[in-house]
Image: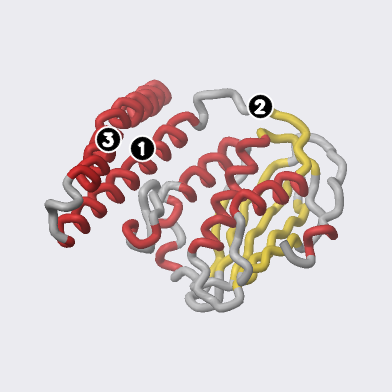
Amino acid sequence: MERANKELQEFAYIAAHDLKTPLRGIGTLAHWLSIDYAEKIDEKCKEQIKLLTARAKLMSNMLDSILQYSMLGREVPKKQRVDLHRVLSEVIVEIGPPEDIEIQIANQLPTVICDRAHVKQIFQNLIGNAVKYMDKPRGQIKVGCVEEDGSWIFSVTDNGPGIHEKYFEKIFKIFQTLAPRDGSGSTGIGLSIAKKIAELNGGRIWVESKPGEGSTFFFTMTKSRPVGIGQAAEAVSDSI
């Protein structure tokens, strides 16, 4: 079984990598057509070419996600001391939430022993989704952390649209998304990557939610040995 899984990972990596080149060519040709024949085609044709370009870009993003997913587990995690307060500050800056969405860090975040890129990616996916799907005039996202039974339990809570219980398992499966891909631009793999990262680090991930009342995503991380508490989040807890 282990050998079969390894071969499947290698196949996914090679297939996704090799498909990038022809797909890039399709996108480039569509762009050239829209420029070279701009005066010879009607508006309907222009819209079709625009749609073709958008679909090619979406497929390229999906292949990038497959490559990223297949790489998880192929390399040994680079364990180090990671100040999560600093990681969260970086994530929020990179996401760049609009002014009508407030992100709060509810309490002190720990310094943990983990792969920095892994934990950063989980927060990027969870906070990024909360921002992307926010449907309220004033969006509120809160990041929290508690210690329980030798593990850290992290949470990302939002006041967005919420998720029906019947989709709690589905959303963590690869290429599963509740919103149309054409409208959201989502590849449907972000939560799958977050789930795999959490499991690779000895934890798990789950969601609690009610439609119309927002969602809270939780993930755990085992404490490999006692670590100190990182810098307090007071500087960013009011509003970021």
Q: Nearer the viewer, mark 2 or mark 1?
A: 1
Please give the label number shown on residue 23: 3
* Residue in the foreground of this view, choosing between 160 and 225: 160
Instruction: Examine the rendered structure and indicate whether residue 172 appears above or below residue 107.
Output: above
**Residue 2 location (% of width, % of height):** 42, 24
**Residue 34 location (% of width, % of height):** 22, 47
User: Within 10 angstroms of label 3, few (less than 14), some, or many (20 or more) residues?
Assistant: some
Residue type pointed to by label 2: Lys
Q: Which residue is mark 1?
A: 63
Quadrant assignment for the C terminus: bottom right
Quadrant assignment for the N terminus: top left
- Decide if residue 144 is on the left or right side of residue 98: right
| Whole-number angstrom distance, CA of label 2 to CA of label 3 | 33 Å
Q: Residue at x 70, y 53 (%)?
A: 153
* Residue in the foreground of this view, choosing between 141 and 79: 141
Q: Which residue is mark 2?
A: 78
Q: Residue at x 82, y 56 (%)?
A: 233
